[in-house]
Amino acid sequence: MKFKLPDAAFDPEPPPILGSWRNIYIAAIAWLVFLIVLFYAFTRYFA
Amino acid sequence: MSHIDWVVMVLAMIAVPSFGLWRGRRNRRNVNDYLLASKTMPWYAMGLSIMATQASAITFIATTGQAYVDGMRFVQFYFGLPIAMVILASTAVPIFHKAGVYTAYEYLERRFDAKTRALTSIVFLVSRGMAAGIAIYAPAIVMSSIFGWPDRITTLIIGLVCVMYTTTGGIPAVTWTDVLQMSVILSGLLLAVMTVVSLMPHSVSFADAVYLAGAVGKLNVVDLKLDWNNRYNLWSGLFGGTFLFLGYFGCDQSQVQRFLTGKSVAQSRLSLLFNAMAKVPMQFFILFVGAMVFVFYLFNQPPLLFQKVAMKELAAQPGYAQIQTQFDDAFSRRLHAAESLNAARKDGDSAALTSATSDYRTAQHDADAARAAGIKLYQKTQGQSGFSDTNYIFLSFVTKYFPIGFVGLVIAVIFTAAMSSSSGELNSLAAVSVMDIYRRHFRPNASDHHYLVASRIFTALWGTWAVAFAQYARHLGSLVEAVNQVGSFFYPVMLGTFTLGFFFKRVRGGSAFWALLIGEATIVACAIFTKIAFLWYNVIGAVVVVVFGVLISRLNGRELNALPPR
């Protein structure tokens, strides 16, 4: 049984910034990682 | 409330839906306009609408109260949201867009079969139908306790305004109303935090307030410890939260319908990614307001219980005076310790700082113990368990200490948040009722105008149901809580079914249908026989459906489906 991203998931329209959707997704996840690190530092500092 | 507060509140309640109706006035000609805004919506409108629909009135009331009582760890619940948004933006958005469907469940018939579509549609109608009533009822009951407003009248007013603009304007009006509602909500929150900080004693700066909140664990945002029974930690948020939000934003029509209205796949993707970036900081900000309210009450004595009616009944009980004395004593010691702590920090006196911190934490522990004893005594007199006054903390504070005009704005925020959640639910309930049930099973070949009229009628009917449900919700007692949890029982299996549809081409309708039932049985078994925190149900349910869907499909090699995949 193959796990495969369906063809319909590919869209040719590029995003308005960062060049590709892949870069946008990476930016969103990087933002989450940044927030978690920031919140962790916040927790540690004020504890 | 003062006259000015009333004027601010009424103006906001009239202006917000009027704006939505005005902005969406051109999109009411056919059923595609009414249910999908003819796919004309820009990303920012969809993004704010998604945010507004997800943030109910009780979110704002309860979240601030939760930070007061339990600190800010609840924010971890949202850590899975950006991950879910990225997954959905890259998969579900283009798939649903290109399928040209009105509802998410319509896709399931194309991919699997009619019975899978019918089952998921009915599950959605039952769970969301009840949730729509609760979305109106929950803030009304809080208003009733604080202002003494009759909850039946409050639910009726919220419900009527909501039904009026949703029935008239359809999804364009709902979306544009949500945009303004979200702006009002964010402005209200910003004003709230500025007001709380400005109400602190002059000797307490913003930095002092943050330090005082942190010293008793109110700024405990991230917990790295993996504990299966702990509802909020980094891991439950990242894993359980991801699955929960995948289910909610990818399988619940009230959210899917938002991104189906996008001008293009790119616009819909951007709306979800906007939420991925903005939601976690927004929740942090709401919780931070609650933490600041806690600091405010270090210097102003809070009531033992924030719910006035409960407090009144508790005060009449034998044993109350002793608890109140303990609470007053703990408050005095905590106030003194907080002032000493502040002074020691400014002087840089580390010995005094250590001593004051210890006293401060002990006094906070004693205040919490006295509050817990008060709650226990109240529960004993009422013969019920599970009492919580968390939902009353923020509004009690607002009505007692906020300046004139601000109170009206905050109440408007609560009402508009209730309306934005409810209107989105009503429109999506109408879409599923008409497209997945009425058109599919009763009138498949009627005119477009017929379906437009049917959509309006179903919106009004669901609105009437929501108001009626809200009118009688007070008699349901603990059932209300159960209704609120219904969604968490069904999202995981829906997510598993959509995952099978999207990614496992050889799995057909029969396998998916049985896997869905097995997944549901597993979640029910987890709820009855284990103490696993509910966020993990989302992982378990979705994984069970996918595994069994694939297994059954393999075992049943001859399984044939009449419809080819997509």
Image: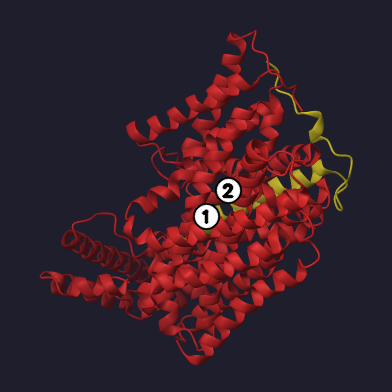
Q: Residue furthest left?
A: B318
Q: Are marks 2 and 1 in contact (CB under 8 Å)?
A: yes
Amino acid found under the numbered disc labelled 1: Val
* CA distance separating discs 2 and 1: 7 Å
**Residue at 82% over, 56% down:** B40
Amino acid found under the numbered disc labelled 2: Phe
> Helix, strand or loop at disc 1?
helix
Q: Which picture quadrant has residue B525?
A: top left
Q: Nearer the viewer, residue B30 or A18?
A: B30
**Residue at 47% over, 36% down:** B537
> Color used for chain A?
yellow
Q: Nearer the viewer, residue B358 or B57?
A: B57
Q: Which label sits on residue B559?
A: none
**Residue at 53% over, 27% down:** B516
Q: Nearer the viewer, residue B394 or B226?
A: B394
> Helix, strand or loop at disc 2?
loop
Q: Is residue B7 left or right of residue B151?
A: right
Q: Which picture quadrant has residue B85?
A: top right
Residue B162 drawn at (x, y percent): 58, 66
Which residue is label 2 attached to? B79
**Residues beneath discs 2 and 1 located on the same chain:** yes
Q: Which picture quadrant has residue B397?
A: bottom left
Q: Which label sits on residue B75?
A: 1
- Badge 2 sits on which subunit? B
The chain letter of the red chain reads: B
